[in-house]
């Protein structure tokens, strides 16, 4: 290749070193005198082939069209500008009448600069022209729709910042043939991009930096690369409003539902409705979440944590309800359970053990009997004097009173519940309170740690 280049050069050399002559100061005459240059378009436009062509690169980020987490691509729209020197051309702007001329790109040599991360063909509109200056500088600008692969890290979604790379390099030319350089500085590129940016969707440009790298190969050659790091940050407000705040509210409602007494209101039904509502909420917001295979975003952990907490608290309620409602059929709790839960844990949870159930209700019962008895004794004295009919009536009344007493006793037993059920209810209360405290503690710790991770990572950018 090098020998061929030299052969070409030896034929082109006498011409290329010279200045082009225009017969008239018109574009047509300049174009005519440029024709020999067009014939050399397959040759890198340098007079001494061992001198590399320096290609200046710059771009303006015009739009961030989107990030596809699933296929890990970033789609952007850029205006790419390349500049290099065509040493074969040079004319006198006075003699030829113009300093710049627009030339069809395929008439001139153009460097084969590509972006390595390209995943799709450039679908931006074709621009067929380049500008050629009287001293041989070629200015080549075109729009490019860059669909670039980018290793996306969505662990911190929706507070994530993506750092994607655009690597500009010549596909086949080595450093000895093409050297890349940045036109201007990357701060200028960043400022220009921020000003020009027309569409960013849910993304915000937070920085562009660049570095030039020379990649050595095993054969002893090297390739030039110009890398741009484009950092974009997601606008997270929509996700906070649509996902996080409703979840937090539902969890709060779930927390407050512990205040519903298990005995009177059906707390489990309430919690069940809450879980159902949350499931529907998750289904309807499912397409807001990114889908990827490798990492699970923290927000998914957060949402499943909320669901898990709700389900756990539902199960807890079912357990407590069972303990409190079904306890009439249970055997009395073992002594160690009573001692441990009622005395120790109960005090810990702020529910002191109830004093031993007094028999006052049962004692009241004989009260009525005592009231009744003297009457019955009096009655007995009267009875002796009374007629047979009165005696029968009295007998009926006595039977009635005995029945009433039995019913009364039964009702009191029912109302008070058996002593064992009383204890189970108390145990249920203590466990309920303890689990509630544990629940609050767990929610606080896990939410605070998730929020800390988000805040620190959000501020570190
Ligand atoms: C252009 O003209 C100058 C003198 O006017 C001459 O020396 C030179 O060889 C000419 N160049 C070409 C390419 O004809
Ligand atoms: C080409 O350039 C190289 C290095 O710049 C130099 O050593 C060599 O002499 C030059 N050749 C000619 C023909 O000018
Ligand atoms: C992007 O990553 C590159 C290297 O991996 C680093 O030099 C650059 O500072 C990063 N940009 C931002 C904004 O984090």
Image: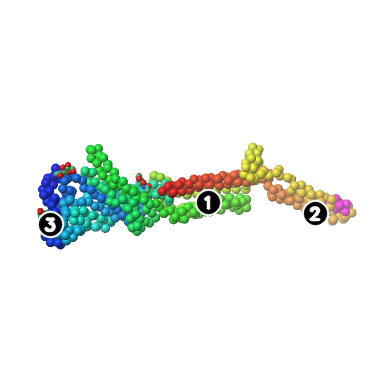
Give percent across and percent down for residue 73: 34, 50
Residue lying farthest to the right in this orientation = 385
Q: What residue do we see at 85% from left, 56% from top?
A: 389
Tell me the mark number nearer the camera, choosing from 1 and 2: 1
N-terminal label among 3 and 2: 3
Task: Please state, as top left, top right, bottom left or bottom right, where the N terminus lies in the image.
Answer: top left
Real-space CA distance between mark 3 and mark 1, rounded to the nearest whole angstrom = 82 Å
Find the magenta span and give its range: 376-382
On the image, which quarter does residue 239 sit in?
bottom left
What's the residue at 16%, 46% (across, down)? 48
Looking at the rendered image, the disc whose residue lies closer to the viewer, 3 or 1, is 3
Marks 3 and 1: CB-CB under 8 Å? Answer: no
For the residue pair 35 and 379, the one nearer the viewer reads as 35
Q: Secondary structure at mark 3?
A: loop
In the image, is the residue at mark 3 within 8 Å of ligand 1 by its beta carbon?
yes
Which type of secondary structure does the marked residue at label 1 adopt?
Answer: helix
Q: Is residue 59 left or right of residue 245?
A: left
The residue carrying mark 3 is: 21
């Amino acid at each position: 290749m090098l020998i061929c280049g030299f052969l070409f050069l030896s034929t082109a050399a006498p011409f290329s070193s010279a200045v082009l002559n225009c017969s008239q100061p018109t574009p047509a005459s300049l174009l005519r005198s440029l024709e020999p240059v067009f014939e050399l378009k397959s040759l890198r436009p340098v007079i001494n082939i061992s001198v590399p062509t320096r290609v200046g690169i710059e771009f303006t980020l015009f739009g961030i069209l989107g990030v596809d987490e699933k296929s890990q691509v970033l789609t952007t729209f850029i205006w790419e500008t390349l500049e290099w020197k065509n040493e074969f051309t040079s004319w006198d702007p006075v003699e030829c009448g113009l300093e710049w001329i627009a030339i069809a790109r395929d008439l001139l040599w153009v460097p084969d600069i590509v972006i390595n991360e390209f995943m799709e063909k450039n679908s931006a509109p074709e621009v067929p022209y380049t500008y050629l200056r009287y001293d041989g500088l070629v200015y080549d600008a075109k729009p490019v729709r860059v669909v670039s692969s980018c290793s996306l890290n969505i662990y911190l979604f929706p507070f994530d910042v993506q750092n994607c790379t655009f690597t500009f390099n010549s596909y086949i030319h080595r450093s000895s043939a093409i050297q890349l350089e940045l036109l201007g500085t990357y701060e200028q590129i960043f400022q220009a991009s921020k000003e020009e940016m027309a569409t960013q969707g849910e993304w915000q440009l937070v920085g562009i930096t660049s570095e030039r790298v020379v990649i050595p190969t095993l054969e002893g050659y090297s390739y030039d690369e110009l890398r741009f790091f484009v950092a974009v940050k997601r606008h997270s407000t929509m996700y906070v409003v649509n996902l996080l705040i409703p979840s937090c509210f539902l969890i709060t409602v779930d927390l407050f539902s512990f205040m519903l007494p298990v005995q009177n209101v059906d707390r489990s039904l309430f919690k069940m409705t809450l879980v159902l509502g949350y499931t529907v909420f998750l289904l309807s917001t499912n397409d807001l979440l990114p889908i990827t295979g490798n990492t699970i975003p923290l927000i998914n952990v957060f949402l499943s944590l909320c669901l898990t907490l709700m389900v756990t608290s539902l199960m807890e309620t079912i357990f407590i309800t069972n303990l409190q409602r079904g306890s009439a059929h249970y055997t009395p709790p073992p002594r160690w359970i009573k001692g441990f839960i009622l005395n120790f844990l109960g005090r810990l949870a702020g529910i002191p053990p109830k004093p031993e159930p007094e028999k006052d209700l049962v004692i009241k019962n004989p009260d009525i009997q005592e009231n009744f008895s003297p009457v019955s004794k009096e009655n007995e004295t009267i009875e002796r004097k009374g007629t047979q009919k009165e005696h029968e009536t009295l007998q009926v009344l006595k039977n009635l009173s005995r029945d009433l007493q039995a019913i009364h006793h039964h009702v009191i037993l029912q109302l008070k519940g058996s002593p064992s059920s009383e204890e189970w209810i108390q145990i249920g209360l203590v466990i309920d309170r303890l689990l509630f405290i544990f629940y609050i503690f767990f929610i606080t710790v896990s939410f605070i740690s998730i929020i800390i991770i988000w805040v620190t990572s959000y501020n570190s950018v």
